[in-house]
Image (spheres, rainbow, N blue to C red):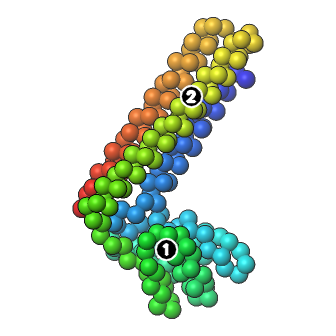
Amino acid sequence: MAVETILKKLEDELEKALNHLHDEYASMQIGRASAALVDRIQVESYGVVQPLKAIANISVPDAKTIQIQPWDRGTLAAIEKAIMLAELGLTPQNDGIVVRLNIPALTEERRRDLTKLVFKMAEETKISVRNLRHDAMEEVKKEQKANLITEDQQKFAEKKIQEQVDEANESIEKASKDKEADVLKV
């Protein structure tokens, strides 16, 4: 495997890890309504399990309400059930046309708990980044031992790997600080 291939593979894997972190942050309930909070909920309707966003329009009419209007009113009960099973801590209100979710204001204690969760998620992502770095470094060492690359190429590759990892860690830090500020904002 060429050095460029190893670096490209690492870049792709790091991007996946960062995207996962951003998705996790987007789905956190932080006291403001967001469609991302519910759009990945899986709903069983007509014998098929599919994401909520595939069977309904999800809108945010105000900062404290998520409104879900299904394309077919026959799926209202299934949507309501799926929301309850998702354990979001929200009670759906079904009026026969739409399902509404009212987002309660966060208490100070809940904000502190969410801040801890933000840092836990960031730390888990950093661990996966370290594992990706380790795997890439091992690949480079294997290439060098098999005499497929020179020692200079190995040093260059290791330097590039570390640069990519440092860049990913900076992105993780920025994302976690931004999310913490978002959680603490009243």
Image height check: is 166 above or below 55? above
Per the model, the C-alpha gap separating discs 1 and 2 is 39 Å
Residue displayed at 46% across by 81% down? 92
Residue displayed at 44% across by 43% down? 122
Residue 54, x across and y down, in percent = 61, 71
Which secondary structure lies at badge 2? helix
Which secondary structure lies at badge 1? strand
Label 1 packing within 10 angstroms: few (<14), some (14-19), many (20+)? many
User: Hey, what amino acid is under mark 2?
Assistant: Arg
Q: Earlier in the sequence, mark 1 or mark 2?
A: 1
Label 2 packing within 10 angstroms: few (<14), some (14-19), many (20+)? many
Image height check: is 122 above or below 5? below
Residue 34 falls left or right of residue 110: right
Q: Which residue is mark 2?
A: 133
Residue displayed at 25% across by 61% down? 108
Image height check: is 20 above or below 13? below
Residue 89, x across and y down, in percent = 43, 71
User: Hey, what amino acid is under mark 1?
Assistant: Ile
Residue 124 falls left or right of residue 6: left
Query: Looking at the rendering, in which quadrant would you find the N terminus?
Result: top right
Residue 144, x across and y down, in percent = 69, 12
Q: Residue furthest bottom?
A: 96
- Residue 71 appears in view: no
Q: Which residue is mark 1?
A: 58
- Residue 45 appears in view: yes
Q: Nearer the viewer, mark 1 or mark 2?
A: 2
Query: Looking at the rendering, in which quadrant would you find the C terminus?
Result: bottom left
Image height check: is 91 above or below 153? below
Residue 139 in which image quadrant: top right
